[in-house]
Amino acid sequence: KAIKLTTSKRKLDFKTELGTDLLRRELEKIGKEWRKKTGYQLRQLISDFVKQLVRLLPFNGITFSHLSRDCYVQQMVEALQQLQYTKKVNKSWLQTPNSTQAIAHVLELLNFLLDVLEHRKGEGMCVLPVVSEKQRIEQLASASGTSYDVMSLQQKFENIKIEKESLNNYRESLKSESPVSKDMDKVTERDGNQDFARLQDFQKETLHELQLQRLRLQEFSELVSLAKIKLKRC
């Protein structure tokens, strides 16, 4: 006889608590070892950590419009907005966390989100009802007299801008960390110098031709003047 598989609420709660224990240890490890990591490695660690939060936070009513691992900054912002986090969130620190000030900011935000999963009331914890992203935009739109569609487009534009900044930072980190990219930069710089030298030669050649043309015109003008003098004598 086939056994029907069921998942009780108690089991779900147990899995969530087990996950938060592992995440707590992982977060402590990030806080201790972040100085040993490159900027790219640190972003990968934070991205992996946020990915686990994204898997667990829906149990607390949080929804995400971006599920890609590359969108960890926007995912954190969405979660904090829905939880009505009271402190200022600096996105640039989330994108480039490899400084003492930035990592302290990031760890504080990650601790806050982890506290939510552990049902703790830490500093800055919201005690108001949690609203979805759509409800939040509708409330803002109603308060400002702007249509929901316009507010939604503005939100999407901000999301795209954040993703673009993250991609640019990722590219910059690759340039700084990859020896191949450094060699490519040298080749590009060398080619650029060669192009500049060719441009200078072309400008000199053009200037020389213009000077010759001016001399020819001057000579022609003098010949015309001489011809006029001869005509007066006749």
Image (spheres, helix red, strand yellow):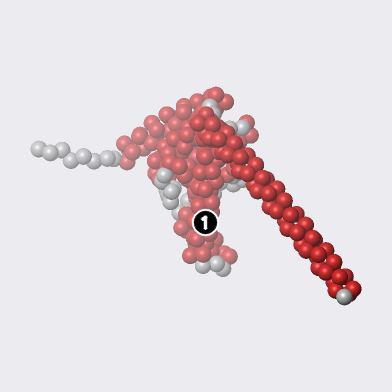
186 or 146, which is in the foreground? 186
Q: Is residue 172 left or right of residue 209?
A: left
- Residue name at image x 61 percent, y 40 percent: 194
- Residue name at image x 53 percent, y 59 percent: 154
- Residue name at image x 63 percent, y 34 percent: 101
Q: Is residue 16 visible?
A: yes
| SS category of the residue bearing label 1 | helix
71 or 123, which is in the foreground? 71
Q: Is residue 36 above or below residue 132?
A: above
Label 1: how many Cα within 10 Å (few below 14, some 14–19, many 20+): few
Instruction: Give the residue pinned by disc 1.
Output: 157
- Kind of residue at badge 1: Phe
- Position of residue 129 measured from the top left corner of the image (x, y, whole percent): 49, 52
Quadrant where the image shows the N terminus: top left
Q: Is residue 139 visible?
A: no
Q: Farthest right residue?
A: 233
- Position of residue 187 measured from the top left corner of the image (x, y, whole percent): 55, 35
59 or 202, which is in the foreground? 202
Asked which quadrant contains residue 217, the reply is: bottom right
Q: Is residue 214 above or below residue 50?
A: below
- Position of residue 185 measured from the top left corner of the image (x, y, whole percent): 56, 36
Q: How many marks?
A: 1
